Amino acid sequence: MRLLPNFTRTPLLLLVSIMILMTAAGCGNNTQKTIPTAASTPPISITPQAEVPRVIKHAMGEETLTGTPKRVVILTNEGTEALLAVGIKPVGAVKSWYGEPWYAHIKADMQDVIALGDELQPNIELIASLKPDLIIGNKVRQAKIYDQLKSIAPTVFSADISGDWKTNFKLYTEAVNKKAEGEQSIAAFEKRVADVKGKLGAKAATQISLVRFSAAEVRIYQKQTFAGLLLSQLGFARPASQDKDASIEKMTKETIPSMDGDVLFYFVTENTGKTDAANVADNWLKDPLFKNLNVSKANKVVKVDDVIWNSAGGIQAANLLLDEIVTYFAVK
């Protein structure tokens, strides 16, 4: 084969080299157009938009809040449970009605939280010292000090402190910017209730009587109470005296017959270190009229925990109350 002379090969080699470089450059451009994978693509940094103010309508008017509060003071027991349920630990809270200072079922979650007195008389100076960015209270309990609280920090009040804890729960979780988490907590509870109701079957026909003993008075508890609402939701029957859309009725010994039912759950509201309420309960349970009740003769009188069935009143207590009902009625 005849070789090209040197002066001919040199321009040709140069031309080939240029073509190779151009091809490589073209390939490079094609590579840049390939869809990137998750491994090769750096994370996108999006600057968050400014928090949109939200107007919270509450028992004392309206409060405009922005963002998620960091230092919340809560002035109701059921409100404390609401905050804990959505992952917010308050900087200060009123103490539980039982416990020093917290109920056993929330004690582990309340480490280092400052106790602020009780619901009826929270310590305003101590509240101010915590420098809260949100205060949550209740009109029934603290209406007289609302203006003082509002001068310390934005303040939201629930209207009532009755058995319908879900209404307050919704307000509290919206106030702390945890609406979605609150809805998830409620949905999980409602699912549990529906599951238990579906398994109760004929047991739901059991007439359940609820009685509370305290040193001052004896009451039957009707449908619009903490325990009464859950019993209604589960479909349980109630005695005629308690099958009412009301909360309580004060008893005298002459009205003991209205306590009768298939099962009677009773709780004793006692002041710490006292036995006055327990003595009242003992006296009534030994009364001939009480002994003559069908539920007493059937040995279906059951003492239960006042904290769970009455006093705590929040979402955690509601779940524990459901647990106790499941246990008693052997729901599988």
Image: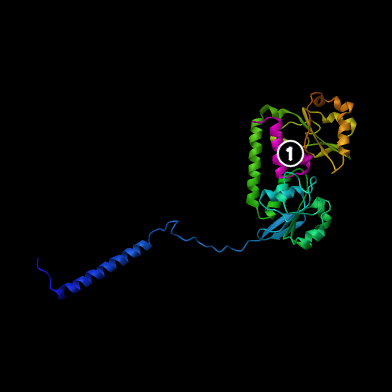
User: Quarter of the image containing the C terminus?
Assistant: top right
Horizontal arrangement in the rendering, residue 175 relative to residue 271 (left or right): left
- Identity of the residue drawn at 63% across and 50% down: 181
Identify which residue, 215 or 158, lies in the foreground. Answer: 215
Q: Mark 1 = which residue?
A: 229
Front residue of 268/7: it is 7
- Name the residue: 78% across, 61% down: 128
Instruction: Report the span colored magenta.
Output: 306-332
* Residue 331 located left or right of residue 136: left
Q: Can residue 95 be seen in this view?
A: yes
Colour scheme shown: rainbow
Query: Does residue 309 belong to the magenta stretch?
Result: yes
Give SS at disc 1. Answer: helix
Give me the residue at 64% from left, 36% from top.
194
Q: What predominant SS class does the magenta segment belong to?
A: helix
Indicate yes or no whether the magenta region holds residue 233: no
Reply above or below: 229 against 287. below
Give the quarter of the image for residue 307: top right
Q: Position of residue 251 (x, y in %)?
A: 87, 35
Q: Residue 210: x and y, percent?
A: 79, 34
Residue type at numbered disc 1? Leu
Quarter of the image with the N terminus in it: bottom left
